[in-house]
Every structure is written in C-alpha cells, then in structure tokens.
Amino acid sequence: MMDRLDAIFEKRQRFMDLLESVRPGSYPPCPLDLSDKGIQQRLRDLALRGVEEMFEAVAHLKNWKSHRFTNVPEFDRDSFLEETVDAFNYFLALLIQVGVTPDEFFDAFEKKDEIIRRRIKERY
C-alpha cells in the first residue's frame, strides 16, 4: 500500500499535469532553473497563493481579538479545513515544482522537528 504522503504528492502532481494539459503554461516542466528570475517570480506567486488561502482560513477564526469581550460560538470547521487544504495544495505544488520528493520532505520535516524540540528543551 502506498504511503499517504506519497499519495498526496502523486495526487497533486496529477492535478498539476491535468491543469497543464488544459491550460498550457500553468506548470512549466521540471526540472526548473531555480536561478532564473522568471521562475523565481512564478514560484513566489505560487507561494503567495498559498498564503492567501491561509488568510481565507483564518478569517473563520472569530475569537482571536484580545480586546473583544463577546464570544462568537459558531465555527465553520469544514470551511476552515477546506481553505487550509487549498493552502496546502499550493505549498505542495511549490515543493513539487522545485523537485522535492516525499522522502526529502519527510526527512526535512524530521530534521526540523528535532531542532524545534531541542530548542524547547534548551529553553531557546
């Protein structure tokens, strides 16, 4: 059985391929020349789309203002999750575009997790 992270990367790649077939130029073929100014601008735009989706997700959080005395009990969890998935898809496409594999991402995640846990223990 395929690892779930592998499956997520594969699904995003298939979506990117589909979009490229319908809208040529959506995702240039890899490997990308990461030193190219136009490619860097394209990747930056892709990352900012993910950030924009995260802003849409956090717009569902209504009780974050420290100066607010009233409480908004409603929370649209499904919409929050949907927007977060949208953001993740853009960030995932960014990783794929720069050639990051599921194994490489997992290894980087593990390495960073170790660093941040050590920082907590050492009262960084």
Image: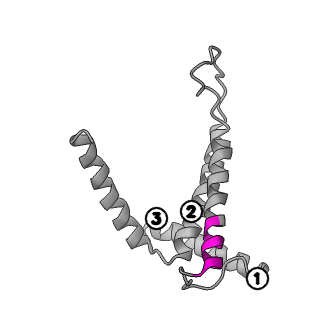
Q: Secondary structure at mark 2?
A: helix
Percent x, y of residue 9: 52, 70
Give the CA separation, mark 1 to mark 2: 20 Å
Mark 3 is on which residue type?
Arg
Closest to the camera, between mark 3 and mark 1, is 1
Label whose residue precedes the other's in the sequence (2 or 3): 3
Q: Is 13 on the left-hand or right-hand side of 111? A: right
Q: Residue at x 31, y 49 (%)?
A: 116
Residue denoted by label 1: 24
- Is residue 57 at least partly visible in the picture? yes
Q: Secondary structure at mark 3?
A: helix
Label whose residue precedes the other's in the sequence (1 or 2): 1
Q: Residue at x 62, y 78 (%)?
A: 37
Q: Residue at x 62, y 48 (%)?
A: 54
State which region is magenta: 36-44
Residue denoted by label 3: 4
Please determine whether, in this image, residue 20 is positioned above or below residue 11. below
Please determine whether, in this image, residue 119 is positioned above or below residue 72. below
Percent x, y of residue 30: 57, 85
- Residue 38 occupies which quadrant of the picture? bottom right
Residue denoted by label 2: 91
